Image (cartoon, helix red, strand yellow):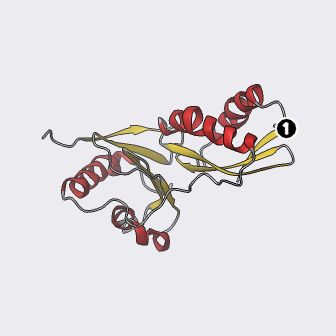
Amino acid sequence: MSEIQVYYEATPNPESMKFVITEHITDNSIQFSSASETQNSPLASKLFGFPWTAGVFIGPNFVTVTKQDWVDWETLAAPLSDLIKEHVESGLPVLVNTEQAEENSNDSEIVKQIKQILNREIRPAVAMDGGDIVFNKYENGILYLYMQGACSGCPSSMITLKQGIEVRLQELFPEIQEVVAL
């Protein structure tokens, strides 16, 4: 069995760092915005034990940590990488009792197609930057999405949303008038 490695890389959001793990850690992705939300994640709970933690996003093979602006990544990145590695190597769970939202059988045909494109094209692309984009609803020509992880609060997220995601989805679905982040 090869040793688990954890390395960190900058994201477009200067307050977020992506910690990539060389092992699959979960099938689900989940955002934590406060310590009170971490009951389903021993790892997120541990990370929120530090006063500078502003957010934690856990993806299939990475953890994105968002920090308060009063502390520097130069101080945090290496120790955080070690902490995440130690947690994963110890065999402690990363997430417990989480269930991914299932496709709703009541979804209209366009909603099913939008979700498919989001899952196949958009989400893997934003995951490369330590974030995620999650479908909320589509009504009256407007698509509502949640931006999570490094995407949440990122200075360039609106450019990505409008010039990347909105343009791509409008190419495929001309009936989409606008894409809005919640």
Residue 62 in the image: state x and y as whole percent. Answer: 38, 45
In the displayed structure, 94 sits above or below 73; it is below
Vertical position of residue 96 compared to residue 21: above or below: below
Q: Is residue 147 above or below residue 48?
A: above
Image coords of residue 70 (percent x, y): 47, 57
Q: Residue at x 43, y 48 (%)?
A: 59
Residue 139 in picture, x, y percent from top left: 82, 50
Seen at 84% across and 38% down, the residue is: 177
Rendered-image quadrant of the C terminus? bottom right
Q: Please give left or right for residue 74 compared with residue 146 in the image.
A: left
User: Residue 168 sits in which quadrant?
Assistant: top right
Amino acid type at mark 1? Gln
> Where is residue 34 drawn, in percent x and y?
50, 67
Q: Which residue is mark 1?
A: 177
- Of 150 and 95, nearer the camera is 95
Farthest residue toward the right?
A: 140
- Residue reaching furthest to the top: 171
Q: Secondary structure at mark 1?
A: loop
